[in-house]
Image: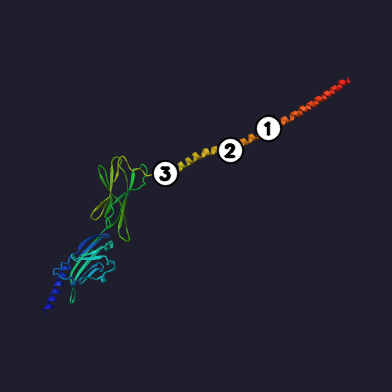
Amino acid sequence: MGTCDSTMGLSNTLLVMALLLSGAASMKSQAYFNETGELPCHFTNSQNISLDELVVFWQDQNKLVLYELFRGKENPQNVHPKYKGRTSFDKDNWTLKLHNIQIKDKGSYQCFVHYKGPKGLVPMYHMSSDLSVLANFSQPEIMVTSNRTENSGIINLTCSSVQGYPEPKEMYFKLKTENSTTKYDTAMKKSQNNVTELYSVSISLSFSVPEASNVSITCVLQLESMELHSLPYNIDAHTKPPPARDPILWIAAVLIMLVILCGMVLVPFLTLRKRKKKQPGPSHECETNKVERKESEQNKKRVQYHVPERSDEAQCVNISETTSGDKSTTHF
């Protein structure tokens, strides 16, 4: 009889504790992407109840069980597959650690502590916690685009930051001179990865560069609780950024240079070729000289051969004339 009364007294005490503690406010906690988050369960266990008599478990906002400790032993059978192998229970601090945090893990979690008595489970403690997940954006980086017209004094800038969460509040350029500081608000472009749910953001700006002063340009990313600043992009008053080269003009200049070079090479070549066509070559002159020499030698030989013949004829004529003369003389 005494034992039954003591058991009933403990059950009633636990029920009262559960009613008092169930209305406790939820606790907020933060975790970083791909790191470990903590889900507290501030159960004081003032009566020093053994874990062998308790059933402790955590569940998410969709009633999916993350972890269960049944009478001092882990019970993975009731754990949802998305949480298996990702949790560890700190018995000293009554805290559940959730490893490899993802953006999808943000939300509300609850821990429950039950007393396992002869008549079943008796609620002892209940606590809620809200987990928020953060991912550090990369340091903003300023890039200078090259579509700037020559001597226009206009410069085009782009600033970007990637792989962060949650979505930033704003992103802007801050232009600082010796006498003033100006904020340039522009439309922020954002994109979100379908798998990781991380954000990437960027802004663009075109502005006229002051001529008489040095300029320092900074890109600022405004987050919920902090600001990220880029390295300053400095423009000296005496050394402005070089103008971008127009690709069309550059190609035209190259083509003109090629035409001029081709003309310088082809004109002398064609002139020399025409001269060679007009003037006989050395081989032709040699052949002509040989022919002329051969004809001259043949003429000389002919002259030598015909001279005696002519002299003999002359002698014959002389002889005949002498004979005829003699005859005439005899006749008289």
Q: Distance between the residues labelled 1 and 3?
A: 71 Å
Q: At 74% across and 30% down in the image, what residue appears?
A: 306
Which residue does the numbered mark 2 point to in the structure image? 277
Image coordinates of residue 284 in percent, x first then y, are 61, 37
Which element type, helix, strand or loop, lies under badge 1? Answer: helix
**Please, is residue 74 above or below residue 266 in the view?**
below
Quadrant, the C terminus: top right
Image coordinates of residue 193 in percent, x first then y, are 32, 59
Which element type, helix, strand or loop, lies under badge 3? Answer: helix
Say which mark, if any, is on residue 297.
1
Tag nearer the camera, 1 or 2: 1
Say which mark, if any, is on residue 250.
3
Of 160 and 47, nearer the camera is 47
Tag nearer the camera, 1 or 3: 1
**Please, is residue 315 above or below residue 242 in the view?**
above
Which element type, helix, strand or loop, lies under badge 2? Answer: helix
